[in-house]
Amino acid sequence: MALDDQPKHHAATQSERKVIIASSLGTVFEWYDFYLYGLLATIISAQFFSGVNETTGFIFALAAFAAGFAVRPFGAIFFGRIGDLVGRKNTFLVTMGLMGLSTFVVGLLPSYASIGVTAPILLIVMRLIQGLALGGEYGGAATYVAEHAPNEKRGLYTSFIQTTATLGLFAALLVVIGTRTYLGEAAFKGWGCRQRRRRQSSRGNLPGLFALRHQRRLLLRPARIGFLKGGLT
């Protein structure tokens, strides 16, 4: 059924439900990757900021975490405009690819003991890329869902995007707590964390790959016409 032939208030079609699910999964994946750093800040400070005392290193690790939040508005502005020009779908793929790639690189970074000050610099760069990607994904997902949701349920379906931050945090907590419990505290702080980060880099992005696969099949913004005509409220 063409967009113009659909009633103003209609039940969500199968394609629209796929858009909502894929957008939500993609945003959960982004938050999951983002929060992993915060949960491992104490260990990351020892790995990448060992050139200073423990307290200062921990502050630097938290500052790198905050840097990712600080650049989120810029990511939202930049990728929001890109989404208007080339489409939300392609923008989603770019932001998710950036998040997955930066997380992969963090898992492979050598420590401060290996390459010196270059290690924390590369870590901060990856955190900035993650923040830009998350800013672009989060706002774009909400807009994309609003464009596809039925009129009478637009607020409900868009609210799913707002829950993804919490779901991503829970997923990251389960991974970290489960790994720490399985390995033991001593092993986790030693080689376990490094091995976990590398496994997460190579295999932990499976949720993101799943979301990418489904986002490639999303509708190309069928509600865009309605917005331009002023027909969507």
Image (cartoon, rainbow, N blue to C red):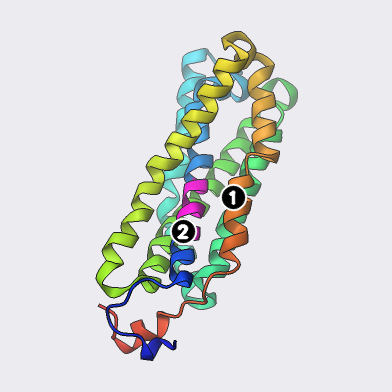
Question: Which of 62 and 101 lies nearest the eye of the viewer?
Answer: 101
CA–CA distance between discs 2 and 1? 13 Å
Residue 120 to residue 212: above or below: above
> Is residue 218 toward the left or the right of residue 143 in the image?
right
> Is residue 161 toward the left or the right of residue 67 in the image?
left
Q: How many marks?
A: 2
Question: Which of 125 and 197 lies nearest the eye of the viewer?
Answer: 197
Residue 142 image offset from top left, x and y in percent: 38, 62
Q: Which mark is residue 208?
A: 1
Question: Which of 203 and 104 lies nearest the eye of the viewer?
Answer: 203
What span is colored magenta in the figure? 21-30
Residue 72 to residue 152: above or below: above
Of the 4 image quadrants, the one containing the N terminus is: bottom left
Mark 1 Cα shell of 10 Å, populated few (<14), some (14-19), many (≥20): many
Residue 211 to residue 110: above or below: below
The quarter of the picture where residue 144 lies is: bottom left
> Is residue 81 toward the left or the right of residue 124 in the image?
left
- Residue 23 magenta-highlighted: yes
> Is residue 71 toward the left or the right of residue 103 in the image?
left
